[in-house]
Amino acid sequence: MTFDTSRRAILAGAGASFFLGGAASAATTDIFPVVETAEGRLRGLVSGGIKVFKGVPYGADTSGKNRFLPPQPVKPWAGVRDALDYGNICPQMPGDRRSDYANLIYLDYQPGGMGEDCLNLNIWTPDLSRTARKPVIVRFHGGGFYGGSSNSPGMDGEMQARRGDCVVVSVNHRLSAFGFLHLADSGAPAEFAQSGMAGMLDLVAALRWVNRNIEAFGGDPNRVLIIGQSGGGAKVSALMAMPSAKGLFHRAVQMSGAMLRVAPRERAKATADAFLTGVGVAGRDIRKLQAMPFHDLLSAQADMEAERRAKGEAPNSFTPVLDGVALPRHPFDPDAPQVSADVPMIVSTTLDERTYRQRNFNETWDGVLKMLATRVGGRAAEVLDLYRQEDPGASPYLIQSRIISDQGRGASFAMAERKAALGAAPAYVYLWKAPSPAWGGRYGATHGVDVGPSAGEVRGGLQGANLVSARLADELSSAIVAMAATGDPGTPKLPTWTPYDAVSRATMVFDAPSTRLEPDYRGTFRKLWASVAA
């Protein structure tokens, strides 16, 4: 063996175990690159050829006098600011590890510290040339509107930046009561009119930062795609209807988080009033609320959510509100928003979404029949037979979860139909059918099984290192990059992907042993649950 004893090689081996201050030599800037942004200079770190900048501020600290207000600008800094590690995440309750699924997705692992100075983002790029103008993918994390962060393992953008030759950005923002406490109807002063949408306004601020600065990281500000799964998909849904976000993104991908409507003001007011009672503050005394330690607010929030958790529901009391200011209409009801009519969009779900919340692994066929009887009455046996014919080898647990998943899939169908009906930019639809290999395939194609593959990743509990996962990740990630680059997810790695409409209902089915395009895939079940809903 031979060893490279050059200065560059020695510095590369040292990694980030030392701090570089002052002027950097040519050798050190190859490893710790410095980028000039509108707010100041940032120092990143090279990882396997990808330039990584973490914890980059796009907004001011949201504590104290900035709490519940729209995001405020970052104060420019002098010198070079290190962007070598994750920034704060919004205060939140730790992810509950008392389920196998939570452990598969590292729900509890959100590095970076916790605090209200949480308006920061992370960037991965293969090229820092201003003339590179590569497509940009901006990722919004899941966790409803109450938890999670862009610092979690599933939000890492290194592999997609490398394999897709694109720039990837992930965003942290305010959550739950910190981002969605609607105070406007509870006696708060006029400047808090948008407090129920503060967390979404954070995302708009992040997109403005991207528009202003991404060229310095090799990105094209005119080819920005936003993507999110679950709560991240709901965030994409809302941004599609926000006038302040118009022109800041050019394509969108909504994964398993179709949000047609947001909370009406009356419901948001009731939630805010209950929260204010919990902390012993009236809405007119908002300054007292701003002065309280964040852990007092978080404790009150947790008390409110305890009942929902006991029922196995997401602690999602605080969500975007139809405030008439930041959000003048529901995202996709009664139709798709005109403000984003020119934005092509992918809408997706997974076959067995609901398994992530169901824990009755020993369910029986009698139990499934009883559950069905509450939904379809005397047709229960007929409906169960349809499902068992489609997948004879599936367990009662999996079938009952698939039934619940199909019944909830109507929002995604409606979103795609309404987007296509505008007749402007196209809608594309996919269904992820390939089951997760975790726990012997017990969870099927569960909620979140496509998150890693959408970024070209197979590490993590839901996928794992196997040839099927690697192929699917290559296919989906390539489609996302193509969508960012051109507005069309077509790639030689997939069959021709035609747009969705109410007639053809073209659906790309990501499956093993092969991915395929199907017209109105599983239309029998779509029609069944549409008739039940009607």
Image: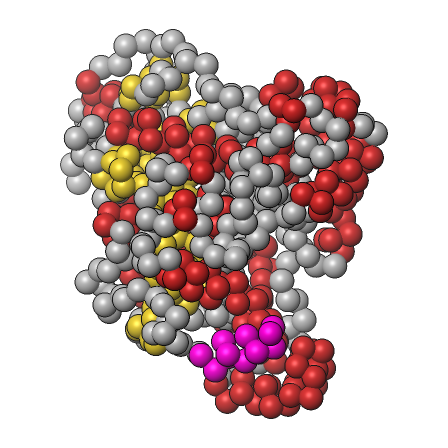
Q: Position of residue 72 (x, y in %)?
A: 51, 21
Q: Magenta region, mostly helix, strand or loop? A: helix
Q: Is residue 402 above or below residue 357?
A: below
Q: Is residue 411 above or below residue 103?
A: below
Q: Position of residue 86 (x, y in %)?
A: 46, 31
For the question of whether residue 90 can be seen, the reply is no
Front residue of 226/411: it is 411
Q: Position of residue 454 (x, y in %)?
A: 37, 54
The range drawn in magenta is: 523-534
As drawn, is 118 to the left or to the right of 280? left
Front residue of 351/19: it is 351
Q: Residue at x 62, y 30 (%)?
A: 193
Q: How many marks?
A: 0
Quadrant containing the C terminus is bottom right
As drawn, is 234 to the left or to the right of 68? left
Q: Is residue 526 magenta?
A: yes
Q: Residue at x 41, y 67 (%)?
A: 431
As drawn, is 216 to the left or to the right of 420? left
Q: Position of residue 320 (x, y in %)?
A: 59, 43
For the question of whether residue 193 can be seen, the reply is yes
Q: Residue at x 36, y 68 (%)?
A: 501
As drawn, is 505 to the left or to the right of 292? left
